[in-house]
Image: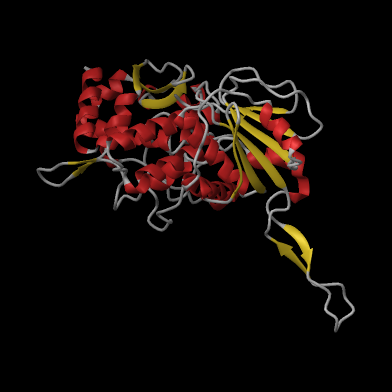
Amino acid sequence: MSEDKLMKARCRLMTIEPWYGHIAMSMNWVPSEMAWIENEESRTMGVRIVNGHDIECVYYPKFVEKQSIKELYGAIQHEIEHIVRCHCIRRGDKIMLAWNVATDMTINGPQASPRIGYKDESNGQLILPLGGKIIWIPNDWPKDWNADQYYNRLFKESKQGSEGSGEQGDEVDKNNCGHNFKSISGNMIDDHSTWDQSDVSEDEARQLIKDAVDQATEKCQGRIPGHLIEAINELSKPIVKWREILKQYLGKHLGNRRKTYSRRNRRFRQFGIPGISHHAAATVNVIVDTSGSIGTKELQQFFSEIETISHKAKTKILLWDSDFQGYNTYRRGDWKKFEVKGRGGTNMAAPVEWLIDNKAIADVQIMLTDGYCNYADEKPFPMVTVITTDADGPTWGNVVRMKIAA
């Protein structure tokens, strides 16, 4: 009964809002007694990412049976948005209830113009999960903030309330950790404790989510819900935390900012006027493996990483498969016009030797590869090797793993 209802709700999404529908169909839907929740009324549904690659929605069959197909339509939208917005992997050390409320506000929107729900064509009525008794953005709050911004405001409000203001709104009764918030009422549609059951890293989860979103967008010919565009763009950000890695090697030169002095003015005795130069203060060579084993998605991610590196330092790209394929300066935005050459065999020791022979060693060398290759012997300069698979890396330098969803 519950399984049939969920399938009908997903089919309706596929017909009316296929972008949501495609993602819903790609997820695993798992019935569960949700025994980890003591209060049966709080057993609803929740998302998680498990087994290294499965985006799942766990649901309590009795909850599903109580809802109409039209109510489930909006509940499924709600679950999908938690996934797309990466709410389930971004809580960190934030206060649980404040983060839960903030994420629900972001998804549900203001009560006057909800972001989820089934619009009944017969009468124009919007049918919402739990009869609309859900958490909304308060009327006097900004309507376009993200979850982090709402969380910060809720956190400040909870601190003020704990100092004895005595003015509290209706208490949110799920996942409560001792904090109440003024101006907030309603119930959470789903259970957020499932987020902690995920068994993948944040980087791996982000790639899986991006892959699901890309597939849905491609199948729907780009028809993405407008309020999700910014969140989807966030998924395309680089995987590797380059600022932290490069800082180890480049230190105070990192970030395209350095102190400068103007030329000495002959009319005055002072040396020059201090200022800031926005020209890169450090140099980076990026060796890109362009052999036949490198797929299109890997190349796309490589250039996403290179774009970020180019914001931190002056960047040059050395393309190499089994032989030299080009060495050029990379400027911001060049990914749009950069031509990748090669696609033959693999020799990742040769480009390192080429840099030495051509006296082109930079402050740090970065290699982007799938790891199915040989490597140069240890050299007396900084080297970071980024590998997209579980293949062996070099025995020297800094080795970083960058998983890319299939």
Q: In the image, 390: left or right of 257?
A: left
Residue shown at the point (39%, 52%) measured from the top left: 138
Residue 132 falls in image quadrant: top left
Residue shown at the point (41%, 45%) measured from the top left: 106
Which residue appears farthest toward the right when viewing the image? 269
Q: Position of residue 342 (x, y in %)?
A: 52, 31
Task: Give the number of callouts.
Answer: 0
Residue 84 seen anywhere in this rendered image of the structure:
yes
Q: Position of residue 110 (x, y in %)?
A: 34, 50
Q: Quadrant of the C terminus?
A: top left
Residue shown at the point (29%, 42%) measured from the top left: 116
Q: What is the basis of the colouring in this image?
A: secondary structure
Q: For this rendering, which residue is in front, 216 or 43? A: 216
Decide: is 338 above or below 374: below
Q: For this rendering, which residue is in front, 73 or 305? A: 305
Decide: is 273 above or below 172: below
Residue 243 falls in image quadrant: top right
Q: Position of residue 205 (x, y in %)?
A: 49, 28
Residue 221 falls in image quadrant: top left
Q: Quadrant of the N terminus?
A: top left
Q: For this rendering, which residue is in front, 12 or 118? A: 12
Q: In the image, 337: left or right of 128?
A: right
Q: Position of residue 263 (x, y in %)?
A: 80, 72
Which residue appears farthest toward the left when viewing the image? 122
